[in-house]
Image (cartoon, rainbow, N blue to C red):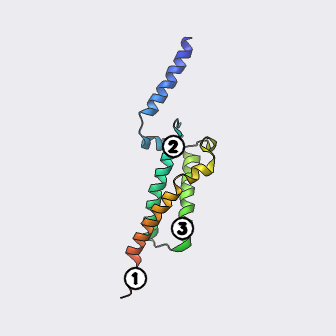
């Protein structure tokens, strides 16, 4: 009976240690055991928001235009999130409703942030005045 309580207490200690970690440190811990599914989806959401802004700034500076810029954004955004959850975190897709559910988490808001950053920076740096 003492063995059973030892196993239970060591499991609780691991969960308590994870509870004390910030969400940022959990996000950068490889193969972290996510006990709260919403926390993992929050990490995906915020990765996407940061990625959207960064790519919008880069596309505005380069300058990329049109469909190529849009397609490249979607490709890079989805690829980075896929690599993050599949190779770095190694989460089970089925726990989150499949790959499509993870891949579309925060995608539209990220796309909006990307467009705003891209359009403003591109217009500021590369617009031609007709006067």
Residue topped by disc 3: 70
Tell me what residue is drawn at x 44 percent, y 70 percent: 119
Q: Residues within 10 Å of mark 1 (few under 14, many from 20)?
A: few
x, y percent for residue 68: 56, 71
Mark closest to the chain's N terminus, 1 or 3: 3
Structural distance between the alpha carbons of marks 2 and 1: 44 Å
Residue topped by disc 2: 40
Residue 57 is left or right of residue 101, and the answer is left
Residue 21 is left or right of residue 96, and the answer is left
* Disc 2 and disc 3 in contact, CB within 8 angstroms: no
Q: Is disc 2 placed on a helix, strand or loop?
A: helix
User: In the image shown, does 81 or 39 lie closer to the viewer?
Assistant: 39
Mark closest to the chain's N terminus, 2 or 1: 2
Q: Residues within 10 Å of mark 3 (few under 14, many from 20)?
A: some
Q: Is disc 1 placed on a helix, strand or loop?
A: loop
Residue 21 is left or right of residue 78, and the answer is left
Residue topped by disc 1: 128
x, y percent for residue 104: 57, 54
């Amino acid at each position: 009976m003492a063995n059973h309580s030892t196993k239970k207490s060591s499991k609780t200690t691991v969960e308590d240690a994870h509870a004390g970690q910030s969400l940022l440190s959990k996000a950068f811990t490889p193969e972290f055991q996510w006990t709260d599914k919403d926390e993992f989806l929050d990490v995906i959401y915020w990765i996407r928001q940061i990625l959207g802004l960064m790519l919008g700034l880069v596309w505005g500076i380069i300058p990329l235009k049109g469909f190529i810029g849009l397609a490249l954004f979607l490709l890079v955004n989805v690829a980075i999130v896929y690599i993050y959850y599949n190779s770095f975190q190694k989460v089970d897709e089925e726990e989150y409703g499949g790959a499509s559910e993870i891949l579309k988490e925060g995608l539209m808001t990220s796309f909006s942030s990307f467009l705003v950053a891209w359009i403003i920076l591109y217009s500021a740096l590369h617009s031609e005045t007709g006067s």
